[in-house]
Amino acid sequence: MRSGSARVGRILKAAVPPALTVAGTVAVWEGACRAFEIREFVLPAPSLIAWQFVKGLPLYLAHAWVTVQESVVGFLAGSAVGLIMAVAIVQWRALQRSLYPLLVLFQTVPKAAIAPLLILWFGYGILPKVVLVAILAFFPVTVDGILGLTRIEAALIDLLRSVSASRWQILWKIQMPHALPHIFAGLRVGSTFAVIGAILAEWVGANAGLGYLIMSSGAELKMDRMFAGIFAASVLGVALFYAVDLLERWLLPWHQAVNLEKAIG
Amino acid sequence: MTSAPDAAFIQVRNLGMTFGDREGRVEALRDISLNIAEGTFVSLLGPSGCGKSTLLRHLGGILAPATGRALLRGRPTTEALRDRPFGFVFQDAALLPWRTMLHNVTLLQEIVHRDQRDRAAQEERARQLLALMGLEGFINHYPHQLSGGMRQRVAIARALAIDPAILLMDEPFGALDTITREKLNLDLLRIWEDLRVTVVFVTHSILEAVFLSDAVYVMSARPGRIVEQVEIDLPRPRTLDLLESEGVNRLARRARAALNRGMDYDALR
């Protein structure tokens, strides 16, 4: 067991370089804005953005809450659909031949191009945003899920055949647990798309949400508010990503250990 | 072992197997015939790619022969499979990384006996078998925490957990170092004598085959055929100092000569 202080030391060691990079970038930005007297509506200084963020915190929280709902609900729905599709495609060979090529084709359609269509179909509310997020989030889960469900050791398959295991027993006892780390890889990729999808849909048609706030601030040339909105949106994206990461650590401790073992050799 | 106490236990008659499609066909096995008596320890010895693993899969009913028959007590092994008489151990332990040793051992029991009420009895049996394999201290460890030899012991315990009539082992110790391998050979013999299970053991090590078995079937290069059946009349229980003995050397020479003949089988004709 490693001691608490060693652990703190390790975390500090990991956190210091990125913190320095961020601090340096902000300092250069702040310095440049002041030194070259860059106009506020071109590029506001970080201090101004921060002030705007603190001053308008309730506003940002209100808009962020809308975006959080859209992205989280859409992400969960998309992931569930993605997982069901992966299982269905692996269980029924006919689907693999018919559905899978269609999915790949669909994935190549630019999602920004469907956003206006979704607004037309589902109106101005939360639904079109949830649908767009789900469309963006399901594909990586499906692809990685299929990978995890099918790449089972040959010896294990022979072993299961030798006891006449049913396909459902194989699915629950072997394929699903084996696929979980792969599914989480897909979820992590999907989580980064979720906030992007929500913002995108808000641009096309919304009266609330961070995407709406960014768009309307831009139209009014309120650059500090726009930047504060962008900042809030990226915080959301990072938070969602690490939430998935934490969930994986909590649910699959054995997988972390296996990885570490492989890394050490 | 005395000759043929129960010759009809496992019977293979003129078995042949071909893989592939019209594009390219590979003949893996040709005209294999053999008998394995109940309770004996038999090895299939042959060069890499000679089809000995394929033959083992025919014996275990997970592969149907193209021609000829593989029978267990007179029934095709592919049918006998339903009664789960076969316990497989492969070169790769193929343990589930998300399960502890205990629950890796209960895996096949869970599949065979679907009733969840048996759970406690299954775990008790798994504990016994892990103890038999010398792993009582590692019941709650995960596969990545164990050495290759220990993992292979768990794989053996897992196969034994469904009380198979036949233990089918496909180069189970092929990836292990010599010291671990010899230790596992001894433990396997001890378990075999304890449980009186029939063992069919695939290997490409002449000494391992001679040391363990009652009979060694030597196979030719592809397509695999039986070149010779070497009866191993060494006393039991066997100990490692036997490996230095003249008896082992004599039998190993015979097996090696048969192997060499098998390598040139096609050239000679």
Image (cartoon, grey):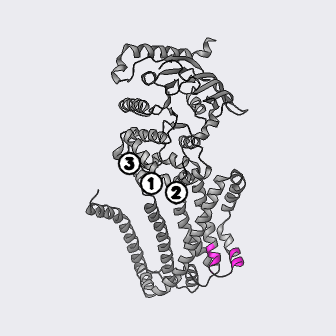
Query: Are there few (<14), some (14-19), or many (20+) residues within 10 Å of tag 2?
Result: some
How many other residues sit within 10 Å of disc 3, few (<14), some (14-19) or many (≥20)?
some
Disc 3 marks which amino acid?
Ile
Say whether mark 2 and mark 1 are on the same chain. Answer: yes
The residue at the point 52 percent across, 80 percent down is A65
B237 in relation to A184, above or below: above
3D distance between C-alphas at marks 1 and 2: 9 Å
| A242 lies above or below B157 | below
Residue A250 shown left or right of residue B229 in the figure? left
Q: Quadrant of the C terminus of chain A?
A: top left
Query: Which chain letter goes with mark 2?
Result: A
Residue B193, image x, y percentages: 42, 29
Judged from the image, the secondary structure of the residue bearing numbered disc 2 is helix
What is the three-letter code of the residue carrying label 2?
A: Leu
Kindly identify which residue carries mark 1: A255
Which residue occupies the foreground of this view, A13 or B167?
B167
Disc 1 residue crowd, few under 14, some 14–19, many 20+, Cα 10 Å: some
Residue plotted at (68% across, 55% down):
A100
| Distance between mark 2 and mark 3 Cα atoms | 24 Å
Q: Say if labels 2 and 3 share a chain.
A: no
Most foreground residue, A131 or A205 = A131
Magenta span covers which residues? A117-130
SS label for mark 3: loop
**Which residue carries the number 2 mark?**
A180
Q: Are marks 1 and 2 in contact (CB under 8 Å)?
A: yes
Pointer 3 residue: B139
Residue A9 at least partly seen? yes
Image marks 3 and 1: residues in contact by CB distance under 8 Å: no
Q: Residue at x 58, y 31 (%)?
A: B59
